[in-house]
Structure formats: C-alpha cells, structure tokens
Image: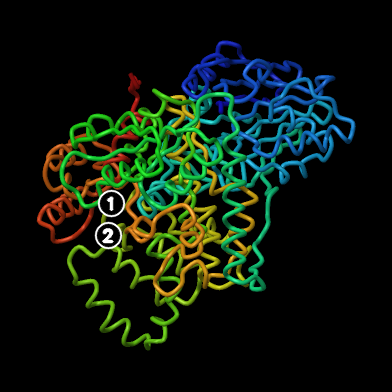
Amino acid sequence: MCGITGIYNYKSKEPVDRHLSEKMKNSIIHRGPDDEGSYFFDKAGLFLGFRRLSIIDLSTGHQPMCNENGSVWIAFNGEIYNFPDLRSELTSLGHTFKTNSDTETIIHAYEQWGMDAFSKLNGMYGFALWDSNNRQLILARDPFGIKPLYYRASDKSIVFGSELKSILHFSQVKREVDLQALSDFLTLTYVPSPSTAFKGIKKLPPGFALICSENGFKVQRFYKKPPKLNYAFKENELIEELRERIVQAVKRQMISDVPLGAMLSGGVDSSTLVKIMTELSGEQIKTFTVGFEGDYEFNELHIAREVAKSIGSNHFEAVVSSKDYEDLLPHSIWHLEEPVATTSTLAFYLICKLARQHVTVVLTGQGADEPFAGYPRHLGERYGSVYRLIPAFLRQTIVAPLIERLPRNERLKRAVRSLGIQDPVQRMFHVYNTINHELKKELLQNSFQANGNNEIIDSIKIWQDDVAGLDGLSQMLYIDSRFSLSDNLLTYGDKMSMAVSLEARVPFLDLELMNFVESIPPSLKIKGLTQKYLLKKAASKWLSDDLIKRKKVGFAIPVDEWFQSEMRKSVEDKLLSEGSACRTFLNPLPIRKMLDEHQNKKEDHKRILFSLLTFEIWHEMFIKPVVWNET
C-alpha cells in the first residue's frame, strides 16, 4: 500500500522542478513511510513520484518500476490479489520477471494486452503508467473505487495524486470552493465523483482511466460488467457457492509479508471474516474494535468482546468520549481532505490508530451492505412498488403531510418523499438526498446558489444505464456499490487507515466474489423482512444464530446526544462565528433554527449539522490562507 503523485507537462514538455516534486512526495509520507522513489523523463516533462508502505516483496518492490527496456514505467498504489495467476499466464507467454511484486505484473500485463489488461486485475488500485513509446500517461482507478486517485487537468499539464495534498502544492492550483460541489455535499454528505470540493480538481470514478498524450487528454471507462441475474441455481446451491467464494476472497486478501489482523464490530460481516481468517491461518487473529463512554444502545464493545472470545482472537479495544471526538475531529478531516460527513469516520480513524500499534494490514467488513442489501433504503426499494399502488392523490394529500409532521423521523420522511417516484434515477436521487429542497434553498445564499441537482443525477445515471433492464433493488445495489460506497465509506476507509500507515483491505469487494454476488436474484438478498438473507445463511456455517439475528449497528457514533448536550455550544460557536465559512456561503438563521430544534428534540438534524461542522473545519484547513499543521 502506497501513495503516488506526479506531473505531466504534455504541451510544454517543461521539465518538472525537483524541489516541487519532493514537496509533493513528502506531503503523502504517511501513506508510505518505508521507501520512496522518483522517475523523471525531462524530454517529455514527466515526473512520477512514489511513497511505499511495504507489504509484499519487501526487498525488491521499489517504485517507480519499469520493464526490461525502460519503455513502460509505473507508480502503483494498491494490491492486486490475483497477481500470482496473472504472473503464471504471462510467464507462459514469454515474459520475464525480475521481482516477486504485484506491481511488475501490471507492467507485463499492459505490454501483453494494452489497456485491456486493467479489466483482468482483481484488487484495489490507483496507478499512473507511462508508455514512452506512445508518449502516453494513463491513470486508472479500480472498479469499485477502493483506492482514490485525484487529478487537475489543464490545456498544458496534468497533475495527479493519491491525495489532494500533493496536488495543492502545484502553483497553478487555486484553493477555491466548487459551489456546485458544495450544493451536492449538502445533499449527499459527500461530493460524488468526478467532482471534488476544490474547484478544478477531479477524481476518477471507479473503473475509469485518464489517458493523456501530446494531443490532449480524455477520461474513459475501462471496466464495465453489468450483472446477469441467475435464477437457475437453487437456494442451497447458491449458499454453498457463496461460502466458497467468500473463503477464496479472504484467502486471496490474506497474502502479506507483514503482520495482519482484522476490524471486528461484532456484526455478521466482520465476524464472518475473522472466523474464516482463523480457520485459514490456524493461528490466533488480532482483532480491533471501538466503543464509547456512556450507556448507548449501539455501543458494541461488549458484543465484539463476546465474538472475539468465541472465535479465540487476540482482541484490542479503543474507548472514545465526546471530548476525544471533538478534539480529534480536525485530524480526521485533515486526512480526509474533502468534506465527508459520515459520523463514523473518526471512530474508524481511532480503530486504525489502535490496529497500527500491532499490525500493518487489516481486513474489514466494508462493502458487504451495498451488494447484499443491508440498509433500510434497500428494504424500501424492495417493497416500494406496494406503496406506489396507493393513489397519488392520497399519498400527496394525506400520507406525506402526516409523515412530515412526525418529530425526529428523518429516515421515514425521506422514504415517503422517494418511494412514490416512478422514475428509478429520480427515486434514487431522493433516497440519497439527506436534506429537503426547501431547507437547502433556505441555507444557500442567493449569490451561491448552484445549478440544481444535475451533477448528482448524471453521476447516478452513469451506473443506472448499465442495469436499466433489471428490477429496482438490483439497480440500487449496483449503483450503491459504485456511487455512494466509493465516495463515502471507501474514501474514509482509505484515508483514515493510510493516515496511520495501515493497509485496510475489503474482501467483500473482491472482484470475483462481487461478480457472483451481483448475479444473485433480489428475492435472496431480501427475503420477507430479512435483509442480507443469503449472506446470513452462508454465515450460519461460522456464526451463532443469536449473532446473525442481532440488529446491525456498525461503528455508530452518539453525535445525536452530543449535539444536544456536550457539543452544542462549541458547534454553534463554530458554525455561526463572525468570518465562518457557514456565514459566508450559507444563511445563519436556518442554521440557528436547526440547532434549537435538534436540542429541543423537535427534529433530528444531526446529519445536516454534522455536514455543516465538517464543511466548516475543512474550509478552515484547506481554503483559508492559513497553513494548518496536522501535528
């Protein structure tokens, strides 16, 4: 696991300044403290930079890496889990390898198959590949967006990196808020690809590549494999097949030359992984979890302890208070680099910090809920057609107004607003929407009003077009696994783990496993009211019935209560102080009203208030002309 950065002055061919290249590399040293490297091709105006966290092939995996004659160079961040199989195939085709790394496999695969090679890679990655014969730079991101890759493109140059910090060192990049991205962030609590919160800086969507030559650049999709639902298999056959696929995915992702452990929340996903890891290794696995001071119903410390005890793992815990949360939140946002307002981000940062004291690699349960239908919105989509049988007149005049008057029912209100919509893209937009149109219009000052919701709808439609012929639930699961997952959970999964030089792997997003999971009919994803039905059936081989039937929690955070008590005053001061970003871009009156309604328990505004707090801290760090020191 590593960090990459670089510049290609494709028009001017101006050599890259060495001092600038060092600053770009040093800004991501936390991603790779073990080694570093640079490649310069001054005649082309190219620089590739690399920081390494050594995981596999510790002695010979130095990067940037090239082929035998130096015509192809690569700076690679990630892991390719099927590289032994690809290596064997390429060797049989006449290729000679000088290292045991997965990085070199990509080089030879590109030599053999060109860009078609990228679709053969089963792993997580963001890489830059330089083809000197064609004077062509290629940036590519894995099919689910597990690894990030940002770029800033102009008519003269491309500057790129695993993190935004390296790009921000480029003198031509101005630190400005993208107003459309701000509007989208308020809607979603994150900024969807290909945009970022910085004006002019983009991120590659999952499964896309940027190709740049002397003639210019283009962004195109290299991975597209829409699912074909398999109704031929019987349920028991699918369960057995799923078990074997999960085991093989875990086995592939346990490849490591350094100590390895696992995140353990006590839920089905992470508990299944730990149990399989224990069986495969025959050793005691180190597991890690996080909990909170106080008696909260979603505090899973005791559950994780029970699971760890039953499996026999070597278990470690971190306990967080509201004071810890408030003090450390800026550190997590500094490493996020974009406003991502998911309250569990800091919890993940703390558990990664704990894990890094003991291991270098962890397996996590991230990515299971999206393809297996684990969220409440999936239940709504599965049976939403029943709600749409109610005449529209009754829904609009009786049901919707009644639901809107209920206090503190944000999720139910959002469901009612979305379920009556026939068009699947519009319906999914409203499902993802965390703020109603009227409130957002009140918040945004007239001078900062954005151009509607077209950016979000277009981002959804990229994926919906692949599966337009499938049922609504299968469409939503496919979109979830590439839209909200990559720019939200996977973004903070990567940034929080790499902040402490820890590699976090996600076996449930193994490419071979996902190809199978997405072929499973929706009736076996949700059966009756049981969500993740087939996964739970498969997990019953390893886990007790009590654990499987336990209500899903994950790394939940009690910000609802904290915003009503300990953090209320500090949040209000932060959002409404003179010179705050919220007062610059937004209207203060609706913010104060939300604070009051939340404290009085009249409404549940925790998501939007946390979004505003996240934006405020982010703006203070990255946009204001003040250098913020992470330490």
Choose the circle earlier in sequence order: 1 or 2. 2
Compared across the picture, whether 576 is left or right of 553 comes to: left
Q: Residues within 10 Å of mark 2 (few under 14, many from 20)?
A: few
Please state the horizontal and vertical placement of residue 404, each as a whole percent of the image. Answer: 23, 71
Compared across the picture, whether 48 is left or right of 583 comes to: right
Compared across the picture, whether 217 is left or right of 77 comes to: right
Judged from this view, the residue extending furthest toward the right is: 94
Q: Which residue does the numbered mark 1 point to in the structure image?
A: 608
Q: How many dots with numbers?
A: 2
Spatial separation of the CA atoms under disc 1 and disc 2: 10 Å
Label 1 element class: helix
Q: Which residue does the numbered mark 2 point to in the structure image?
A: 439
Task: Locate residue 68: give its quadrant.
Answer: top right
The amino acid pointed to by label 1 is Ile
Which of these two is toward me, 536 or 494?
536
| Whether residue 229 is situated above or below residue 300 in the rendered picture | below
Please state the horizontal and vertical placement of residue 615, each as a whole percent of the image. Answer: 32, 40
Which of these two is toward me, 150 or 95?
95
Q: Residue at x 35, y 69 (%)?
A: 415
Q: Residue at x 51, y 53 (%)?
A: 483
Residues at marks 1 and 2 touching, judged by CB atoms closer than 8 Å: yes
Q: Quadrant of the N terminus?
A: top right
| Whether residue 24 is situated above or below residue 594 in the rendered picture | above
| Whether residue 136 is situated above or below residue 296 in the rendered picture | above
Q: Residue at x 60, y 69 (%)?
A: 468
Please state the horizontal and vertical placement of residue 6, each as a whole percent of the image. Answer: 61, 24
Task: Locate residue 613: give its quadrant.
Answer: top left
Please state the horizontal and vertical placement of residue 244, each as a whole percent of the image. Answer: 61, 53
| Whether residue 381 is situated above or below residue 92 in the rendered picture | below
Residue 358 badge: none
The amino acid pointed to by label 2 is Leu
